[in-house]
Each structure stands twice: as structure tokens, then as C-alpha cells.
Image (spheres, grey):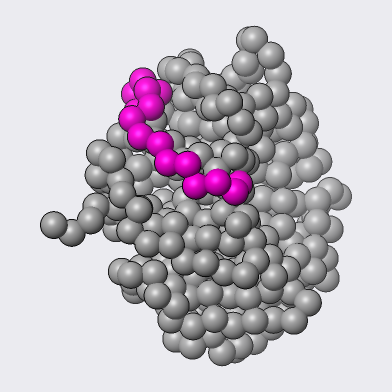
Amino acid sequence: MAGTGASSAKLPAEPELLWEYKADDAFEATPVSVGGVAYIADAGGAVHAIRVADGQQVWTKAFDDAIFISSAAVEGDKLIVADIDGLVRCLSTKDGAELWQADADAEVNAGPTIYQGAALVTTEAGALLAFHLASGEKQWEFSIDAPLRCSPTVAEGRILLAGCDAKLHAIDASTHKETGSVDIGSQTGNSAASLGGRAYFGTEGGAFYAMDAKDQLAEAWQFNNPSRASGIRTAAAVAENAVVYATQAKEVFALNPADGQPLWDVPTRSRVEASPVIVGDRVVVATSRGRLLLLDLATGDESWQYNAGGSFIAPAAVVGNKLLIANDDGVVYCFGAKSP
């Protein structure tokens, strides 16, 4: 799902709850998985490694005074996680041992992106920092004059950042210099989804954009809800035939990625803080009242739901043909098909 929020995996028609994993503190992040193990950090400062097959704990590592609200990133045997105070840690995926730590010197609210041997981290001070994956040494820095609350998106050899300065920035991934920016009308903290040379994202003002990102940044199209403007605080998920996002007006929209024409919109009855995820021909939607929904990607029709309680703040992860998602009750849920 890297960069798109979409997976070609196929979930069962009606997924069943396979297991639950309970922590002592809230989860505000998405699990990341490699080698059959899912990794997620909680708001109480603990990092958890969970076996995907059965939900059993592999290891847990607690850090005093840390608060984790963003997702981790994994590369090989290294797990990168940043706390809200800006301390970036590299842990061993084997046992959670700390390999290095680095200070971003400002609050961090978004998960890191790993690219070309570096962990890319954004901060509330408006900095994009690149830390060497092996040593934690800061390699380079780029900054804007407003907070960055998005995870960096790498597309077409550039790093895309949608900022609270109401601009989309493009940074050359080799020279680390800005190659262009485009005004987007209002601030945003959303990470851009990227597919086919275009970047897709929404803003606090309610506008949803498709930007051509192959050469110079340029607006391809813009969509505004004709009924009412409402802030967009989720990242989009994009596939060949649809781009999907949620608004603060308790609605999920699907647009044609080619021209921005609306395909469908569905009311959710409660806020959606977690970004939608496309899985095959369906969309996973998780609400702030603990409802998990599967919608048909073509029509928006609901085909399945599960009431977990609590509040879902971060999107689901797709691991094989399983769906993992965590809530602020401190529970990780795994859905899939039970073995006969």
C-alpha cells in the first residue's frame, strides 16, 4: 500500500474476528508488518511486536515519558518510531533493543518514511529531516515556515509535502532542494497519495486536489463538495478507477482519478478520523465510534460492518488476506477467514 493507501489483497466476503491483542494504553497508529510480525506503538510509550498468525506478543519495549501517536516504519531488521516530543528511535525488529536515537528538535505527529537508506521525518517546526538508517546521523534538512503534519510521500524522484502553509512542496530526492510548490488554498496535515504520476490529497478548507507530479507540479483538477464545504483530515486511498477520502461532515467520497468527477458519497453517521483503505474491490472505513465498514469500491454500497467500540483514529493495515486495525481502547483487531 506504500504511497497509494490501496492493496490488491482479497478479503473474505464477511471477515471474521481472528484475534484481539490488548495493551494498557491507547493506540493512535496503524500496525506495520514484516515477516509475519506486526509492530505498533501506543500512547503510553510502549512499542509492541505481535505475531500476525495468532496475536501473541513477540516482545514489548517501554520508554518512560514517551507518547507515540504516529505509525512506525520498518526496513529490514530496523524499526523506526518517533514520539510526540521529537525523539526518533531505531529498534531491532528481533527484540526491541534500541540501536540509536536522534532528536528532531520539535514535535512529531506523522510517521516516518524510509527512502534510500534514510528515515524521513517531518515536524511541527516545519522541518523535513533525513536520518541515516544505520547510524541515526542527520544527513540533510529542508524546512518551510509552517508546521508539517504529513508523512513524506516519495513519487517520481521527488518528496512531496502538503503543509500548513497552504502549499504542496516538491523536493528533489537527490539534491534535497525544492523544485516547486503549488498554492492549495488552505492548510493541510494530510499525506499525499500517489499513483500514475499524480498526487491526491484534501485540505482543511474542503478542497480535494489531484496534482500532476511527473515534471513541474501543476493542478490536474480540484473537487469541492457542492452541498457544503467540510474539512478533510484523512489521507486519500487511490486505485486505478477511484480515489476515496473522508470529510469532517461524516461522509466518504469516491471520485474518478482521471477527472475528479464524483462516483458516490456515503454518510457514516459519525466522524471518520482514520484514512480509508482500498482492499481489492472494497473500501475499509473505520469511524470515531468504533464501527468498521466495508464498502463496494464501485458503488459505495455497504457489504459488512463490525462494531468494536472505542474510537478508530488510524487506518487499517492489510497483511496478506488479513486486516489489522487498532483503537483508542488499546486493542489491535485482526480480521480474516477462519481456517476450516
Instruction: Tell me which segment is drawn in magenta.
Output: 296-311
Tell me residue 142's x, y (percent). Answer: 75, 60
Residue in front for this viewpoint, 127 or 177: 127
Residue in front for this viewpoint, 163 or 169: 163
- Residue in view at x 37 percent, y 23 percent: 301
Residue in front for this viewpoint, 119 or 244: 244
- Residue in view at x 68 percent, y 65 percent: 43
Left or right, 214 with respect to 131, comes to: left
Tell me residue 129's x, y (percent). Answer: 71, 66
Is 226 drawn above or below residue 200 in the view shown? above
- Residue in view at x 54 percent, y 81 percent: 60
Is 187 contained in the magenta span? no
- Residue in view at x 59 percent, y 48 percent: 310
Q: Quadrant of residue 295?
A: top left
Left or right, 316 with respect to 220, comes to: left
Tell me residue 171's x, y (percent). Answer: 65, 53
Examine the rendering and report whether any part of residue 313 can be seen.
yes
Q: Quadrant of residue 195?
A: top left
Q: Farthest residue toward the left?
A: 340
Tell me residue 221's x, y (percent). Answer: 56, 22
Q: How many marks?
A: 0
Is 314 drawn above or below residue 106 in the view shown? above
Is 310 contained in the magenta span? yes
Left or right, 151 with respect to 30, comes to: right
